[in-house]
Amino acid sequence: MAVFNAYSHEEMIATLKQAAPHADIYTDADTLAQHKNDPNGIGDADGDLLAYIEVSDVDDIKGVLATARKYHLPVIPQTTATSTVSGSDAETNALMLSTVKMNRILDISREDQVAVVQPGVINQTLNEAANKIGMFYAPDPGSRPISGIGGNASTNAGGMSTVKYGATRDAVLGLKVVLADGRELKLGGRTFKQAFGYDLTHLFVGSEGTLGIITEITVKLLPIPLGKAVMGLAFFDNMTALSKAVTEVRASGVYPAMLEALDAKTVAALDVYEGTHYAENNGAMLILRLDVGGDEALAATEKILDQYGANHLHVTTDDTEMASIEKLRQDMLPAVFAGNNHVMEDMAVPMSQLAPMMDYITEVADQLHVNVFTAGHAGDGNVHPTLTWPKDQTAVPDNVIQALQLMFRKALALGGTISGEHAVGMLKNQWVNEELGDNVDYVQHQIKSLLDPMGILNPKRKIN
């Protein structure tokens, strides 16, 4: 088919450079190839980028969007590229808009208990800054040392502390957003209560860059709890027993700050990665943290764990040891990924259905002969089965695809979701009707059409 282009790539890049004069614009083959796929995804890029752009101010963002509108080019927003669902993989002739250099903490207030940050601020950097004034930033995804607040907001990232403090949405008070047509919106603010107007702030949280470009985020901070935190490890015969114990701990009034689960295969992989010997305990590992409640909360937790068959329980208040325990959970992914191709999934189910979900994952793995490492945020019902296959097998195996389909439908049948915290991306956008239904799917497309009528913002993500 003959295609008669109205503009050359060179003409489009020239317009882009004029429209975004302060941005770093890369068009060389090596840089474009480097940013073609998210490092933690499965390589789902649909063509090559036209340019990779690192912006440092809002005017340049508006310039990029103006160029995209003129030439009908896709715009793929990105901060630190930690997506696991092809959230910022390339599209043909797309402009990848990186806000990684917009990384300043604009304000941090102990009195108001808020911080105002640009999207490229690293989660851990914000938390460390808050710690210096006696506060902390609660949302704690496993990617805390490397993920940006902008990406956390765009995906409504969850994490290890969600069990007590909620996901990113629960911490976001306000946003500044640039729409596809260049208009800038100021949404929400510094107050903990806000009942005026539609809640547009949280429409954009979790929208995966499909409705606008987030340029500033106001988040709530919390005071560091009084007293000494406690962290611990316990082991169970299997993930089902662990899940039942966790469900009871959640209902006990203890209010744990972390309840993380790793199955026996994941523990063994961690031993190889860390040089530890936890697999000798023969079972699934529970990592727990209590921020408040002291001896009474710890005693109640220990009693419940004992009732449900926990063994080798070890607790500590030593800061160094607590950091090493938390590092086990953070290192779970590189330990499991090592030397393998992989898909890490993200179902969440009601707490009452966590044990049946764990049973089903084991059943599917055995039935289809799939290598599955299961971990997750057991305290909020969020399960992360990671399916792996040999590195030299580039295509996703049929049995892996079939296993995921079965797990997804089981999670939905149990009243859950197939995306608890990792977003939808391109990996799961075919499942919108199945999870949300036709009517919700249609309304989502109406919202998208209103805010991005040309469909240039992160196409094929979130909705198909």
Image (spheres, rainbow, N blue to C red):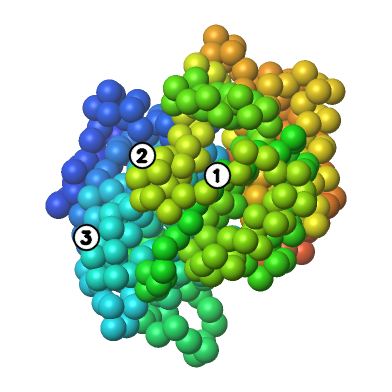
Label count reads 3
Extreme residue in the top direction: 392
For this view, does 199 lie left or right of residue 320?
right
**Cα distance, mark 1 to mark 2?**
68 Å
Amino acid at dot 1: His
**Cα distance, mark 3 to mark 1?**
40 Å
Query: Which numbered dot is residue 104?
Result: 3
Residue 295 spot, x, y in % from top left: 54, 65
Q: Closer to the observer: label 1 or label 2? A: 1
Q: Above or below — where is 294 with respect to 83?
A: below
Q: Residue at label 2?
A: 6
Residue 148 in view in this figure: no
SS of the residue at dot 1? strand
For this view, does 266 lie left or right of residue 182?
right
Q: Mark 2, residues whose alpha carbon is within 10 Å: few (<14), some, or many (≥20)?
A: few
In terms of depth relative to the viewer, which is nearer, 165 or 312? 312
Query: Which numbered dot is residue 314?
Result: 1
Amino acid at dot 2: Ala
In terms of depth relative to the viewer, which is nearer, 262 or 452? 262
Q: Above or below — where is 298 with respect to 28?
A: below
In terms of depth relative to the viewer, which is nearer, 214 or 134? 134
Residue 298 spot, x, y in % from top left: 58, 61
Residue 148 spot, x, y in % from top left: 36, 52
Residue at 35% of width from left, 26% of height from top? 33
Q: Please say if the residues under marks 1 and 2 sit with CB atoms less than 8 Å apart.
A: no
Amino acid at dot 3: Arg
For this view, does 341 lie left or right of residue 61?
right
Residue 97 spot, x, y in % from top left: 33, 47
